[in-house]
């Protein structure tokens, strides 16, 4: 098994994170040009005056920097210990796909039930990956 293959899903998740990061200024500037927000609304983060469709990319970006840290660490550990298997590679891609689904839902129609399901299943996949890693050490 090519151990470096684990870095493809890592890179995909990083690119998703950068794509969401770009949404933050795009939505803020668009809202500013339409006078829906002003610069003072962002002085200390996001005030209550910021509409939901403008603040959601920032919240999603934070989501992509929280639990995925454990994914990045795990992938590095898998590579460093030469424990990347086909099953763990598939699980890594499943994790990234579920995070992408979560992001698309969050940034579009934002149904909490659908978003929450994608989030929960992605976390279960990540937990299973960690358990598999420790049981194979």
Image (spheres, rainbow, N blue to C red):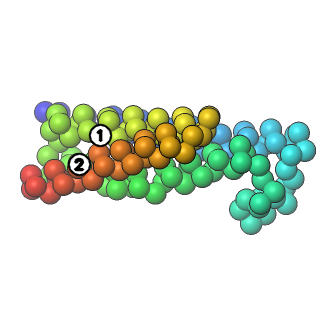
The answer to whether the residue labelled 1 contacts the one labelled 2, judged by CB atoms less than 8 Å apart, is: yes
Left-right relation of 53 to 81: right
Q: Mark 1 Cα within 10 Å, few/some/many (few <14, many 20+)?
A: many
Q: Is 72 in front, or is 64?
A: 64
Which residue is identified by label 1?
A: 92
How far across and how far down the image is residue 68, in percent? 40, 51
- Residue, far left: 136
* Helix, strand or loop under label 2: helix
Q: Quadrant of the C terminus?
A: bottom left
The quadrant in which residue 40 appears is bottom right
What residue is at 35 percent from the left and 50 percent from the top? 123
The answer to whether one can see residue 64 in this image is yes
Residue 112 locus on image (x, y percent): 54, 45
Q: Is residue 62 left or right of residue 29?
A: left
N-term-proximal mark, 1 vs 2: 1
Residue at image coords 47%, 47%: 116
Instruction: Give the structural element (helix, strand or loop) at label 1.
Output: helix
Residue nearest the viewer, comparing 118 with 26: 118
Instruction: Kindly indicate the quadrant of the structure image that contains residue 49.
Output: bottom right
> Which quadrant does the N terminus fall into?
top left
How packed mark 2 is, by other alpha carbons closer than 10 Å (few <14, some 14-19, many 20 or more), is: many
Residue pictured at 86% horizontal, 46% vertical: 36
Which residue sits furthest bottom?
A: 44
Numbered circles on residues, count = 2
Q: Position of residue 45 (x, y in %)?
A: 71, 62
Give coordinates of residue 53: x percent, y percent.
Answer: 71, 43
Farthest residue, direction front = 113
Q: Between 26 and 2, which is closer to the camera in this rendering?
A: 26
Instruction: Please give the label number shown on residue 7.
Output: none
How far apart are the alpha carbons under marks 1 and 2?
8 Å
Report which residue position mark 2 lands on. 129
């Amino acid at each position: 098994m090519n151990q470096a293959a684990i870095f493809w899903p890592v890179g995909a998740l990083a690119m998703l994170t950068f794509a969401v990061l770009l949404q933050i200024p795009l939505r803020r500037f668009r809202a500013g040009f339409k006078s829906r927000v002003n610069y003072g609304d962002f002085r200390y983060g996001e005030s209550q005056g910021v509409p939901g469709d403008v603040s959601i990319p920032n919240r999603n970006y934070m989501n992509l920097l929280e639990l995925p840290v454990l994914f990045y660490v795990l992938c590095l550990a898998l590579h460093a210990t030469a424990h990347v298997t086909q099953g763990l590679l598939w699980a890594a891609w499943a994790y990234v796909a579920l995070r992408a689904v979560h992001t698309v839902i969050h940034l579009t129609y934002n149904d909490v039930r659908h978003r929450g399901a994608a989030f929960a299943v992605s976390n279960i996949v990540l937990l299973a990956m960690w358990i598999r890693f420790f049981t194979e050490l």
